[in-house]
Image (tube, rainbow, N blue to C red):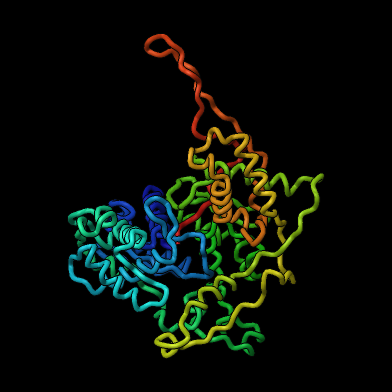
Amino acid sequence: MRAREISTLALDSYQRAARVALSNHLVTTTYPDRIALPLLRRWATELREDLLELFGYRLEVTETTARLFPVIDALDDSQPARTPTDRIFDRRRYAYLALALAALGRAGNQITLSELADHVAAEASQVDGVELTTDRASDRDAFVDAIGWLATRGAIALADGDASGWANNPSAGEALYDIDRPVVVAMFRPPRAVQHLRSIRGLLAGSDAAIDPEESDAGLTDSGREADPKETLRAVRRALVEQPVVYVDDLDPDGRTALAASRTVADVELLTGLVAERRAEGVALIDTSGRLSDYRFPSTGTIAQVALLIAGEISDRVIDPDAPALATYPLPDGDALIEQLDGAIPDGGVFGDLAEFDFGSDAGTFDDAVGKKRYPLIEDSWLVSVGDDLVERFGRTFAAQWQTDRDGLRLRSIAMLHRLRLIHSVSGGVLVLPVIARYRDVMVSVRDRTPQDSLFGTEQSPSTDQSPRTDQADITDLSEVEA
């Protein structure tokens, strides 16, 4: 491992470069900032070797881009694309993003927003269920969101005009963009041609061979190959940097052995500069720098603070000896999401003609509890009651938009806890995961501003901060990198 050869004085710089690469799979001259690419270029040789050795990741660095090609072990729906206003992309925005990227790959050095919209509209008309009509304001807004996502990452740069002006009135507004072709080329690099897949499983690790039931019974992996100890170690290390917490119960026996080995976690700590917190239930890497995690928790803001309060209430409910016993269920497997995505693949056409492999499906469903760890279920009705109670107690300190939207506030807070793997959202409620116990006994204090004499000698009316201050004895950041 090259990190062991780096001097103590330079190690901090190297760890910052590693965190940049892991948290931003695409780095350009402007994204995520102007100092990221020079930092990666300085340590390109060492990073290339260490990322491949520890995680199986491939790093490509050029003069204008740095691209990390991760290995995907499981589908993750917790890190969607977002608009500048933090709105999650819907299916229409994802479709426009894919079609715009394809159009940019065929364009010259510059393109106007209206011309790009015409290209996307023409391609969208050939896809069932996708349509871009520039006369419709909602379509223009969604298209501009997709273009903004590309502009943020440096694929295009505004040369003249204003995209919002075009969105408001396409006949009067216009925007001209410079196209950065190396970024466009680096942005979409799937491990396998999408047209060759019959299942989304083909994009996951170990999916480069068809399943042979006889070999699987003989003790081989799902991909038909013997389990490789090095690959097991890499998979565990990938989980450490990609998930907020790695639970022992999520791993197979080989994975548990790898996680228990001190060297496995120590190597990741040395590369990233993060500190591991090891509990009986699993391991979490704590990001005290705040430069690897995409979400800090606990944090400021109404949603984050309400999420912390709900976490404390859930923890108290689970251990309450006087309350009725909670039903327990195993975590659902990932088949539902895979089947949903596979259902969108056309049966005929180029997909069927070029498909090479037929991947089997993982066994087990949500109702199959054989051999699976079971977790307490908190029902939605209880969460609604807790959310309403928190609004009654602290609503005056919440941001104005949430004071009248209790359901939205609760759902956003629950989604944050789900993303941090403190809970797992299921139909009818949430399954409580062990690490949430670190946030029990949350103490809350609302600070009032001290009245002061005004310039003219009159006393101002007391007011409160816009959000409550939450205190807890052991609070650190459990969030991890963005996919």
Residue 272, x across and y down, in percent:
45, 55
Q: Is residue 396 above or below residue 309?
A: above
Q: Nearer the viewer, residue 464 or 67?
A: 464
Q: Residue at x 70, y 54 (%)?
A: 378
Q: Residue at x 43, y 60 (%)?
A: 89
Does 375 sit left or right of 472 as displayed?
right
Q: Where is residue 461 drawn, in percent x and y? A: 48, 19
Report the number of discs: 0
Q: Is residue 433 visible?
A: yes
Residue furthest to the front = 135
The residue positioned 68% from the left and 69% from the top of the image is 366
Q: Is residue 38 left or right of residue 427?
A: left
Is residue 43 visible to us here?
no
The quadrant of the rendering that contains the C terminus is bottom left
Q: Position of residue 368 (x, y in %)?
A: 72, 72
Q: Is residue 439 above or below residue 40?
A: above
Q: Pick the residue in front: 156 or 9.
A: 156
**Is 84 located above or below residue 48 in the figure?**
above
Q: Residue furthest top?
A: 457
Q: Which corner quadrant of the image does residue 112 belong to?
A: bottom left
The residue closer to the viewer here, 276 or 118, is: 118
The percent coordinates of residue 232 (x first, y second) are 56, 71
Residue at 71% in and 44% down: 316
